[in-house]
Image (spheres, rainbow, N blue to C red):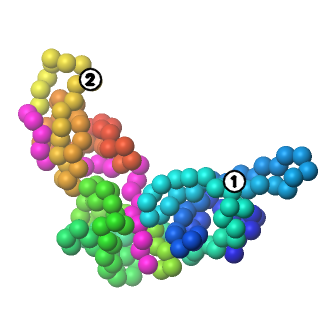
Amino acid sequence: MSSTHNLHRGMVFRHDGQLFTLLDFSVSQSGKQRPTVHLKVRSLKSGNTGERSLDELGKIDEVPADIRAMQYLYAAGKDRVFMDTESFEQYTLPADAVGRDADFLAEGENYRVLAIEGQPFAVQLPPVVVVTVVETAPSAHGGGGSSVYKEAKLAGGAAIHVPLFIKNGDRIRVKTDTRDYQGKEH
């Protein structure tokens, strides 16, 4: 059970059988009313964010959670297999735990994995990843400004829009939350 002085950003808690992470919180008080604690939370299942008050949630119970370094090994159908870099145990994360981030996973790379109650739960990608372009139209120079884009397929399977000068084999930086092109890796 958590009181206001035990709240901290990043904590994971269970409410109505669902897991949430606390993104932010604030306390407000007007006049002689008792203080209200406002929480900004994200559902770990759907990824949706919302705001609630501590009064709406009632008492919340913190769930033990930690971040582990894990190496991505391979895809097993839609699931993804990771290895804990400390214990060398292998874990299979179901497709819904990885979601559309699976498009950016590269075999052999290390990632941050959220573990809840000792079990891997979700992959946390960095804000920007470097990936290889595997298929795109031939590169073109001239005939357009920097706002002209073409579609490119990336090594993990994602399809994004890139500038005309990008060609097959180029390594590019991509923003993981918006899937926007961020530049060419040199």
Q: Amino acid at mark 1?
A: His
The x, y position of residue 143, in whole percent, is 15, 17
Residue position marked by numbered label 1 in the rendering: 38
Q: Earlier in the sequence, mark 2 or mark 1?
A: 1
Q: Quadrant of the N terminus?
A: bottom right
Q: Please name whichever residue, 42 or 160, is drawn nearer the observer in this view of the structure.
A: 42
Q: Quadrant of the C terminus?
A: top left
The x, y position of residue 159, in whole percent, is 21, 45
Residues in magenta, as a range:
119-138
Residue 74 visible in the displayed image: no
Q: Residue furthest top?
A: 143
Residue 146 numbered tag: 2
Q: Residue furthest left?
A: 138
Q: Nearer the viewer, mark 2 or mark 1?
A: 1
The answer for how far apart the CA atoms under marks 2 and 1 are is: 43 Å
Q: Residues within 10 Å of mark 2 (few under 14, many from 20)?
A: few
Question: What residue is at 37 percent from the left and 76 percent from the top?
Answer: 84
**Element type where label 1 sits in the image:** strand
Question: What residue is at 42 percent from the left and 71 percent from the top?
Answer: 121
**Element type where label 2 sits in the image:** loop
